Amino acid sequence: MKKIIFILCCLFFCFAKCKTKKNCHRTAKIRNDSGQSIIYAFLYHSVSDNSKCSLDGTEIKPGETYEWRQGKDCLENVYDNANWEFYLINPNQFVNEKYKEYACDSIPIKNLVLKHYVLTLDDLKNTNFTIAYP
C-alpha cells in the first residue's frame, strides 16, 4: 500500500510541475503579411548523410497565420541549444517532393526562396514567437 501511495505522489508532483511551467510556448506562428501565397518549408537534415536535406511544405495564403508545433515539448526546451531553420518559398517554384532527400545546397537553386530563417531561442523570444513575412 505504501508503494502505491508513493507512486501516486510521484506522479502527482511530476504532472503538477509540467503544468505549472512558466514561459512554455508549444507553437510558433508565421504570419503572411504579403500579397502572395508563400510556402513554409521546414528543413530536415538526413540522419544518414548530413549533406542531404528534405523540405516539408505548407502553403500560407495572404493575411493568414500558420501555427507551427515541434512535437509536444516547449519550444524553450527544443531550441535552447539548437536553431529553428526554415525557408519561405514561392509556391510557383517549390519543386521539392515531401520526404525526398536532395543535396542541401540545391534548395535555393531548385526553389525560389523568398527568405531563409535560422532562428535562435532568443530570436523567437524577441518576436514573441511570431514571425511576420515580409
Image: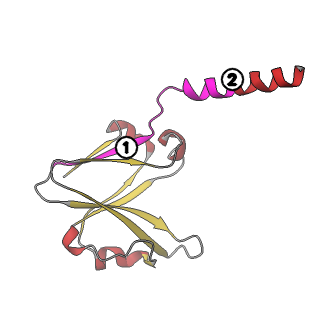
Q: Which residue is mark 1?
A: 28
Which residue sits furthest left?
35
- Identified at 75% across, 21% down, the residue is 9
Question: Which stretch is magenta?
Answer: 12-33
Q: Amino acid at mark 1?
A: Ala
Residue 126: x percent and y percent?
34, 37
Near mark 2 (Cα within 10 A), the count class, few <14, some 14-19 or many ≥20, is few
Picture quadrant where residue 28 is located = top left
The foreground one among 93 and 80 is 93
Q: Is residue 57 left or right of residue 80?
A: left
Determine if the magenta segment contains residue 76: no
Q: Secondary structure at mark 2?
A: helix
Residue at image position (14%, 53%) is: 34
Locate the N terminus by quadrant. top right
Mark 1: which secondary structure? strand
What's the amino acid at mark 2? Answer: Phe
Q: Which numbered disc flags the more N-terminal residue, 1 or 2?
A: 2
